[in-house]
Amino acid sequence: MSQLLSLRHYHHEQIAHSHDHAQLVFGLSGRLDFEVDGRGCEIASASLAVVPTDAHHACASPLGSRCLVLDVPRDGWLQQRLGGHFDASRRLLETPGRRQLSPAQSQLVNWLAASPLDDAVIAQQGAALLLASLSGSHAPAVAPGLPLARLDAHIDQHCAHPLQVADLARLCDLSAARFHARFLAETGHTPMEHVRQRRLQLGRELLINSGLAVGEIAARVGYASQSAFTAALVRELGLTPRELRRQAREARDNCRE
């Protein structure tokens, strides 16, 4: 195991491994995409990731990030240093995921990050203080849901142009990979499936509520040709644009009778 506390820089290259000790990764600057035992999270300033002993974890930071890492010694050290905080700290270290820091905890992390971490007294006492302060606040933070209404508004505004997962991910301050995983978990389909469905929905509304030519509608909702738009409608709804318009017209006529 490396020294107790260390400063580390992460980049776009993914790191994936496990180790025989628990680890806490505190965000200092930038954003770090983190996954522990299949659970994804994002680590930034004032938050940390808990990695239990032997837990497989992976991380990468496309734009770069800087973190303070605490490699936790075995139970003997915990029991000796933490006393009455031992049981709560052990429970904390057994639960993978992201935690939010209080302002006081953030100050302690930043102070340690600016200290000489190769000083044994500072490292030992600082690590014990961090664990003791976290032992009373070990409930996982609940990540907010994605801003789906904002994403839909962006798709609607730009649907005539090519849209990529990275374009939508930037609206959420997430990497493309992390955004894709969260979107799939929250909605049940991929971002690009949602973009396709949104384009078809907008195209259907224009067919029903406007007199625009089918080719013009296809271009407005991001299809390269009228035939591609028609094929997508048939796959999704089982109707051609002409059939869809006729069906809508008949429904309106029936309502007037």
Image (cartoon, grey):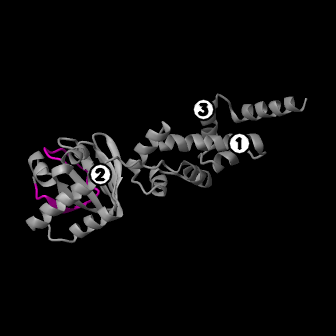
Magenta run includes residue 163: no
- Vertical placement of residue 236 versus 134, above or below: above
- Vertical placement of residue 61 versus 191, above or below: below
- Vertical placement of residue 241 versus 155, above or below: above
At label 2, which amino acid type do we have?
Gly
* Residue 165 image position (x, y, % from top left): 46, 50
Side of 95 where 217 appears, left or right? right
Of the numbered discs 1 and 2, the one sitting upstream in the chain is 2
- What's the magenta region? 2-22
Q: Residue at label 1?
A: 205
Q: Residues within 10 Å of mark 1 (few under 14, many from 20)?
A: few
At label 3, which amino acid type do we have?
Glu
Side of 152 where 174 appears, left or right? left
- Residue 31: quarter of image: bottom left
The Cα–Cα distance between marks 3 and 2, rounded to whole angstroms, is 52 Å
* Residue 46 image position (x, y, % from top left): 34, 61
Give whichever of 61, 246 is nearer the camera.
61
* Residue 136 image position (x, y, % from top left): 29, 51
Q: Residues within 10 Å of mark 3 (few under 14, many from 20)?
A: few
Q: Residue at label 2?
A: 136
Of the numbered discs 3 and 2, the one sitting upstream in the chain is 2
Q: Residue at label 3?
A: 236
Q: Are marks 1 and 2 in contact (CB under 8 Å)?
A: no
Give whichever of 186, 77 is nearer the camera.
77
Q: Residues within 10 Å of mark 2 (few under 14, many from 20)?
A: few
The Cα–Cα distance between marks 1 and 2, rounded to whole angstroms, is 54 Å
Residue drawn where x is 21% and y is 67% of the image: 112
Residue drawn where x is 11% and y is 59% of the image: 3
Magenta run includes residue 8: yes
